[in-house]
Image (cartoon, rainbow, N blue to C red):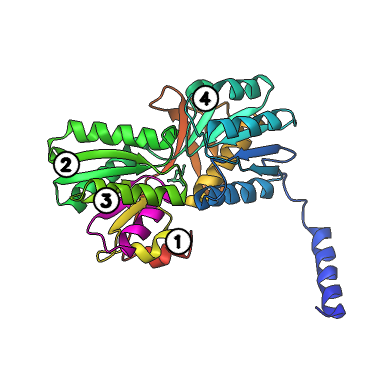
Amino acid sequence: MNKKLVSAILCGAMVLGSVMPAAAAGVGEGQKLAMVVKSAGNAFMELAAGAFKETAEAEGATVEIVYPEAPTADAQIKVLDNLISQDFDAIAISANDVNALQAKLQEAMDAGIKVSSFDSAPNPDSRQIFVNQAGTVEVAQALMDAVLDITGGEGQWAILSATSQAANQNAWIDAMKTIMEEDDKYSKLELVEVAYGDDLPDKSTEQTAALLQNYPDLKVICAPTTVGIGAAAKYLQDNGAECKITGLGLPSEMKEYTGDDKACPYFYLWNMEGLGTLTAYTTMAMVAGDITGAAGDTYTAGELGDYEVVEAADGGTEVILGAPMEFNGENIEEWAEIF
Ligand code: RAM
């Protein structure tokens, strides 16, 4: 930029500065926030964390994103230990285990740190609020109906999950099983196995191969994990398998595999930026003392609008971002550009 242009911009800024009122302080002004994700190397977690950081920083907070070295509760306990000693105002966490983090998260709350959770909820005693990306039963219903549709209403199907302890995947799987048992229209479906790829691409690929080998008539794999669905879709498509995949995925990672003539006819997810943004506003509102995380609390989450805290099925409280979104051959290109 040439010097004249720079000084013209500076002059303009000074003039504007003298007439414009000072910007209002953001809701996160002066707050020190940490986000603990499930593990590194998971694009879903990076997207949620990116939106959380951007939103909270724009509101005046300082933010640290922490990536545990493995998708386990132990690895999260290690990083929590470190955070508790560093004077954070709040920790937002996606739990690798429902119960195993309780003592550590209680220690954090006893030290005056607000504990919010997002994506994967630790038990109610371990948190003050859960930011749920979509209703648990709604997600399970969408997945069960996809399995019913893609199998043609009958036959063998399997689940490829994340870790066996993952709180969110287990909640969705339990809800799917309940839906399947309660309605006769699913009675010709046979769930043969729940396999675990631990949210690691290689292990998810191995588990997909094993499912195909063990169940030659398998019609559909449902993977309620972005890492699992991506690995399985690649394996099924590269090997020309008849078995199809559906589940929860990131459009950008599923682009090549989605459509009626591909390995994945369609799948679901939610507004990824919204998840990070809503978690940021929720966490900041707790630190500011605008909400406590009790059912009935209301607050504004920036451009996302107004939210109300409600009772969650596990006895704790939650705020629900919205409904799950379907991605298919028609809209995948467009969404893959976004996340
Ligand atoms: C994986 C993680 C995450 C989950 C998504 C759908 O990225 O397991 O927790 O919400 O999948």
Please give the residue where the numbered disc 1 appears in the rendered image.
252
Q: Secondary structure at mark 3?
A: helix
Which of the 4 image quadrants contains residue 279?
top right
Q: Earlier in the sequence, mark 2 or mark 4?
A: 4
Does 233 appear in magenta?
yes
Question: Which of label 1 and label 3 is nearer to you?
Answer: 3
- Mark 3, residues whose alpha carbon is within 10 Å: few (<14), some, or many (≥20)? some
- Mark 4, residues whose alpha carbon is within 10 Å: few (<14), some, or many (≥20)? some
Instruction: Give the Cα distance between marks 1 and 2.
Output: 30 Å
Q: Pointers 1 and 3 in contact (CB under 8 A)?
A: no
Q: In the displayed structure, would residue 85 be above or below residue 2?
A: above
Q: Earlier in the sequence, mark 1 or mark 2?
A: 2
For ligand 1, tell me if the residue under mark 3 lies within 8 Å. Answer: no
Q: Secondary structure at mark 2?
A: strand
Instruction: Give the amino acid type for the residue marked by disc 1 in the picture.
Output: Ser
- Mark 1, residues whose alpha carbon is within 10 Å: few (<14), some, or many (≥20)? some
Q: Which residue is located at x 19 percent, y 31 percent?
A: 181
Q: Residue 109, which numbered label?
A: none
Q: Which residue is located at x 52 percent, y 50 percent?
A: 42
For the question of whether residue 261 can be seen, the reply is yes
Towards the viewer: 331 or 263: 263
Q: Residue 189, which numbered label?
A: 2
Q: Earlier in the sequence, mark 1 or mark 3?
A: 3
Instruction: Give the Cα distance between marks 4 and 3.
Output: 33 Å
Instruction: Give the Cα distance between marks 1 and 4.
Output: 33 Å
How far from the left and from the top, in percent, is residue 69? 60, 41
Please give the residue where the numbered disc 4 appears in the rendered image.
100
Question: Which of label 1 and label 4 is nearer to you?
Answer: 4
Please give the residue where the numbered disc 3 appears in the rendered image.
212
